[in-house]
Image: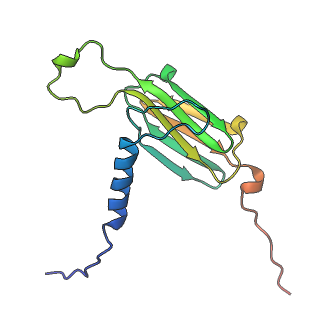
Amino acid sequence: MTIIKWDPFRGVSELQDRINRLFEESFPQTSEHGDDVVQCDWRPLVDVYETADSIFVMVDLPGVKKDNVAVEAKDNVLIIKGERQVNEIVGQDGYFRKERSCGNFFRSLTFQDTIDPSKIKARFKDGELKIAIQKSERDMPKKIEVKVE
C-alpha cells in the first residue's frame, strides 16, 4: 500500500478554474471596444502558447463556418467573434436532449507586448482556428556575449 501525503491545496487551482468558467458563462462580458453590449450564447475553448518568435492562439470552433468567424486586433487586444448557426432542420420540439450551444460567441485576449496586426496570420481548418502572432524584434530575447577577463 502506497502512502500519499495529503495536500489540502491540491484541487484549489482546478476549483478556481471551474468557478471562473461558471461566472464567465453566466455573466457574459460587455465589449470594451464600443458602446454595444455583446451577448454571448457560448464561449469556445481557447489555448494560448508561445515559442521563441511567435504567440499562438488555438480556438475550437466545431460546426462553425469560416465565413462566420472574424478576427480583429486593436490596442494589444485580439478579438475573435462569430456565430454557430442553429440547426434549422430540427425544430425546437424535435430534440430529446440539446447540449451543444449555438449562436454568437466573443472572445478577447489582451497581450502585454505590442502586437502588430500586419504580422498576424489566421488559418481555419477542420473546426479549429489557429492564429499566429509574430513577436516584434524588440520583444524577442537578445543573446549578449559575456567576455571573461
Colouring used for the render: rainbow
In the rendered image, the vertical position of residue 128 relative to residue 50, given as above or below: above
In the rendered image, the vertical position of residue 144 relative to residue 135, given as above or below: below
Residue at the extreme right:
149
Task: Judge by depth and name the residue closer to the eye, 141 or 21.
Answer: 21
Q: Is residue 62 left or right of residue 99?
A: right
Task: Judge by depth and name the residue closer to the eye, 74 or 26.
Answer: 26
The quarter of the picture where the C terminus appears is: bottom right
Q: Is residue 33 left or right of residue 103?
A: right
In the rendered image, the vertical position of residue 119 relative to residue 112, given as above or below: above
* Image position, residue 109 (x, y; %): 56, 45
Query: Residue at (18%, 81%) from the top-left corner?
Result: 2
Query: Residue at (69%, 49%) from the top-left corner?
Result: 135
Query: Residue at (30%, 67%) from the top-left corner?
Result: 11
Residue at the extreme front:
35
* Image position, residue 48 (x, y; %): 51, 49
For residue 12, which quarter of the picture?
bottom left
* Image position, residue 81 (x, y; %): 51, 31
Query: Residue at (29%, 76%) from the top-left corner?
Result: 8
In the rendered image, the vertical position of residue 126 relative to residue 30, given as above or below: above
The quarter of the picture where the N terminus appears is: bottom left
Tally of numbered tags: 0
